[in-house]
Image (cartoon, grey):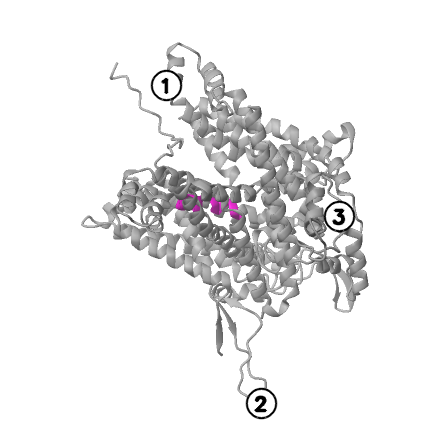
């Protein structure tokens, strides 16, 4: 197992190197540091001195890929690519490109906590509610409840999450005045602000997930062991919870696990709509402000989390299914 | 007056896709196997109804994809015979809806309103008053709106309703006549009414009727009122919603079309060659899929945007510019989104390459490329088809999110994402402006729902492994006799 994990980690590093090269090429080749300087300094007349100063301040004044003037390994190391990559792998994200020059690492640390406050309850509730709803439909399979349940699921998954947010904010915050429309506060007050986004996000994904899980359960329910369990005289709910649910856990983990990176990165749309200062909102601000340093760091962080969560999913397989051996 | 036909990038691709669909239909017609499978799709009532709706939307898209620029009248006294063309690019849909474009008010107005939504300071007979001004176009034919409005709207609605029902009736009779073959028209109609037909025609015709009933009054009212009101700059919302259909369609189809070359070629290659080629291709798509999707797309779009801003000379008109941006967005969605299909095709190819017929082809010395093109590709086409239809609805929904993030289509282009984005502020303002939001919601849900239902039908018919877990209302008959 340890061997396997180490191998996966090594492959993960390889992938991160690929991601880094890709984003670097994307950001620096199309858009040279000179262009970025012009964009960030703003104004119509930007002198070359200003540009050079801006580049020197942020360490963009070296050659991009290959320093022909240097000697030995310095040809490779005294470049923007090398310096940026090494600092990224050390999780030092540096400062943002914009005039405010934020410390990205510090921002990530403080904002990730906020994102987690929204995403962890959401992740857990999402699993419980979707699985519960799917089990309900399976329990009443081939009946009216099942039929209309699936119809509702298909309707719900055809509606954009933006509609849920706008209607939800309108209904719960404006009309009923139950919770504030948007904003955030630390401590226990956060509940008041987080409850609506959690609920709406739950609702917006329920259709997709419940339908998916229902299919997974129905796949299992046709198996021989289920017939055996019924033949033993077990009650239907025992069959569902003890046998079907447990066996369907593997595909459920696969599909739920793909959300894991977003648990840490936060939801782009929900955070910015509800004014929650998490990582998702941070990314949106960076995109609209064209702050490439932040976007680059977040791409790296996102793929790091992706790699880690896939290792975590593999480990989770061994927990739920003793037959799985990681080798 | 002359005009110049303009083929925008996305127009070209839409017509190419249309040609491909027609070619595929011809192939289906000739192959008994494919015909049987598609017949299975048609026998599924939700899928057939969805197909009807989908076709209506496609017709609007195609109409909206024939673009041209009108020639400007020669200014008197100018030498030379060179004709200049208007910078406005119109489509056939614009020509049909010319009244909606011309009837631009000054600001917000409610659906079917005769007066503006916001009070304005007016000069009434020398006296300055604040009141709701009359709309320039909405209900302009009424002399006394307060008294005539309800009657006029009701009359037009009923007229439209009757027209719609008439159209639906004509379609029904035509369908019944077409399938009558030998028996009388009445018998054929009766069979449809009792749902005794092979293909669920009753459901399809009910869908047609529903569409006509909705469209009839809308068309009848649209000439003299703003059916969905007007937005902040006074443009007709109904027109915007109709124009957004094309954008949604382009995103939904073009992006998957853009994924196909990479996904099909690389996926099949990885599965067929195995070894280091497989490793390399797997590495490529793992790298791509490990980057959070929105971020990767945002990064690419930002780059493209910067490049486009630096070269304004590439584009003759604003429409062309917006169109190139839309096309590039689709290409970006394609390049970033090929991983899942490639993974699927790789797995399937790994299985197929061990089968006897591929082994036989190998033994005969058929080259690797030929085996892949002639023997493997035709056997994975069903997966490509299923993915294409399944992705459509997801992409349409995705466009809204991307537009919200600010990396979607050009703001000057009508799109559901743009409408929702504006509606966000309107819905939180006071008094609320709900019609733009409602129109976007209605059109988008209809389109996405139709796409989803159609995709389900296609998947059930084409995927041999997918088990039908479709809930049925028909309860299994009690089997008391056997015991």
Q: Which class describes the residues within 10 Å of circle 1: few (<14), some (14-19), or many (20+)?
A: few
Give the magenta-colored segment's residue range. B384-396
Q: Provide the residue designation for mark 3.
A: A96
Question: In the image, is B289 to the left or to the right of A77?
Answer: left
Please, what secondary structure does the residue beneath circle 2 have?
Answer: loop
Q: Provide the residue designation for mark 2.
A: B79
Q: What residue sits 48% from the left and 41% below the top? A: B279
Q: In terms of image quadrants, where is residue B382?
A: top left
Q: Predominant secondary structure in magenta?
A: helix
Q: Is residue A230 above or below residue A59?
A: above
Q: Of the residues under marks 3 and 1, which one precedes in the sequence?
A: 3
Please provide percent x and percent y for residue A298: 67, 43
Q: Quadrant of the N terminus of chain A?
A: top right
Tell me whether the residue at label 3 lies in contact with that at label 2, contact meaning CB atoms closer than 8 angstroms: no
- Which of A324/B231 is in front? A324
User: Can you tell which of label 3 and label 2 is closer to the viewer?
Assistant: 3
Please, what secondary structure does the residue beneath circle 3 have?
Answer: loop
Tag 2 subunit? B
Query: How many angstroms separate mark 3 from mark 2 (CA)?
Result: 57 Å
Question: In the image, is B37 to the left or to the right of A38?
Answer: left
Q: Provide the residue designation for mark 1.
A: A224
Q: Is residue B387 magenta?
A: yes
Tell me whether the residue at label 2 lies in contact with that at label 1, contact meaning CB atoms closer than 8 angstroms: no
* Residue B435 seen anywhere in this rendered image of the structure: no
* Residue B357 seen anywhere in this rendered image of the structure: yes
Tag 3 subunit? A
């Amino acid at each position: 197992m340890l061997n396997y994990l180490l191998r996966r980690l090594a492959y993960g590093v390889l992938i991160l190197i690929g991601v880094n090269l890709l984003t670097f090429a994307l950001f620096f080749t199309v858009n040279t540091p000179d262009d970025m300087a012009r964009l960030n300094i703003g104004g119509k007349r930007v002198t070359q001195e200003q540009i050079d100063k801006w580049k020197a301040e942020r360490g963009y004044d070296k050659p991009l890929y290959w320093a022909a003037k240097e000697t030995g390994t310095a040809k490779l190391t005294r470049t923007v690519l090398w310096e940026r990559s090494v600092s990224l792998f050390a999780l030092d994200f540096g400062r943002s490109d914009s005039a405010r020059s934020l410390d990205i690492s510090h921002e990530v640390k403080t904002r990730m906590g906020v994102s987690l406050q929204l995403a962890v309850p959401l992740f857990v509730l999402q699993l419980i509610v979707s699985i519960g709803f799917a089990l309900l439909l399976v329990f009443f399979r081939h009946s009216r409840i099942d039929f209309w349940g699936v119809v509702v699921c298909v309707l719900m998954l055809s509606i954009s999450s933006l509609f849920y947010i706008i209607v939800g904010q309108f209904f719960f915050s404006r009309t009923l005045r139950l919770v504030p429309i948007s904003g955030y506060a630390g401590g226990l007050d956060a509940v008041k602000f987080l409850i609506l986004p959690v609920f709406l996000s739950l609702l917006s994904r329920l259709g997709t997930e419940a339908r998916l899980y229902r299919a997974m359960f129905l796949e299992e329910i046709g198996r021989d062991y289920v017939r055996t369990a019924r033949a033993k005289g077990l009650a239907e709910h025992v069959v569902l919870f003890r046998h079907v649910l447990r066996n369907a856990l593997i595909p459920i983990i696969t599909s739920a696990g793909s959300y894991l990176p977003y648990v840490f990165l936060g939801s782009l749309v929900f955070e910015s709509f509800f004014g929650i200062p998490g990582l998702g909102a941070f990314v949106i601000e960076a995109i609209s402000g064209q702050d490439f340093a932040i976007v680059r760091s977040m791409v790296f962080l996102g793929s790091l989390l992706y790699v880690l969560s896939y290792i975590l999913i593999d480990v989770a397989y061994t927990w739920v299914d003793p037959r799985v051996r990681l080798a | 007056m002359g005009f110049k036909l303009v083929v925008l990038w996305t127009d070209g691709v839409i017509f190419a896709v249309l040609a491909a669909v027609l070619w595929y239909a011809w192939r289906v017609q000739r192959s008994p196997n494919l015909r049987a499978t598609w017949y299975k799709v048609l026998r599924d009532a939700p899928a057939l109804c969805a197909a009807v709706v989908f076709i209506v939307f496609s017709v609007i898209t195609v109409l909206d994809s024939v673009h041209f620029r009108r020639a400007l009248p020669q200014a008197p006294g100018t030498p030379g015979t060179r004709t200049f063309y208007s910078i406005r690019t119109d489509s056939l849909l614009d020509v049909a809806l010319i009244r909606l474009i011309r009837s631009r008010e000054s600001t917000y107005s409610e659906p079917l309103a005769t007066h503006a939504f916001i009070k304005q300071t007016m000069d009434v007979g020398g006296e300055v008053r604040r009141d709701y001004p009359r709309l320039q176009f909405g209900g302009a034919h009424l002399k006394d709106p307060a008294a005539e409005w309800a009657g006029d709207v009701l009359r037009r609605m009923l007229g439209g309703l009757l027209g719609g029902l008439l159209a639906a009736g004509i379609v029904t009779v035509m369908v019944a006549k077409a399938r009558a073959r030998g028996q009388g028209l009445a018998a054929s109609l009766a069979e449809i009414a009792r749902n005794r037909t092979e293909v669920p025609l009753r459901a399809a015709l009910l869908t047609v009727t529903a569409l006509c009933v909705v469209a009839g009054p809308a068309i009848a009212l649209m000439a003299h009122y703003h059916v969905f009101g007007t937005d902040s700059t006074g443009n007709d919302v109904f027109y915007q919603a109709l124009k957004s259909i094309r954008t949604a369609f382009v995103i939904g189809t073009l992006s998957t079309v853009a994924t196909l070359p990479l996904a099909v070629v690389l996926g099949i290659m990885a599965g067929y060659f195995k070894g280091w080629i497989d490793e390399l291709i797997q590495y490529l798509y793992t790298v791509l899929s490990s980057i959070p999707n929105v971020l990767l797309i945002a990064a690419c779009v930002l780059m493209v945007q910067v490049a486009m801003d630096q070269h304004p000379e590439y584009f003759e008109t604003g429409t062309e510019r917006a169109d190139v941006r839309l096309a590039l967005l689709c290409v970006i969605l394609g390049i970033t989104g090929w991983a899942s299909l490639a993974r699927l095709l790789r797995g399937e190819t790994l299985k197929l390459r061990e089968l006897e017929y591929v082994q036989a082809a190998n033994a005969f010395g058929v080259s690797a490329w030929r085996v892949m093109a002639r023997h493997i590709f035709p056997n994975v086409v069903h997966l490509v088809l299923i993915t294409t239809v399944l992705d459509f609805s997801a992409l349409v929904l995705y466009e809204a999110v991307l537009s919200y993030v600010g990396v979607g289509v050009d703001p000057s282009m009508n799109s559901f994402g743009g409408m929702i984005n504006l509606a966000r502020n309107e819905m939180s303002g006071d008094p609320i402006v709900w019609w733009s939001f409602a129109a976007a919601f209605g059109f988008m849900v209809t389109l996405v729902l139709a796409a989803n239902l159609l995709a389900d039908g296609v998947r059930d018919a084409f995927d041999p492994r997918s088990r039908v877990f479709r809930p049925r209302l028909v309860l299994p008959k009690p089997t008391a006799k056997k015991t």
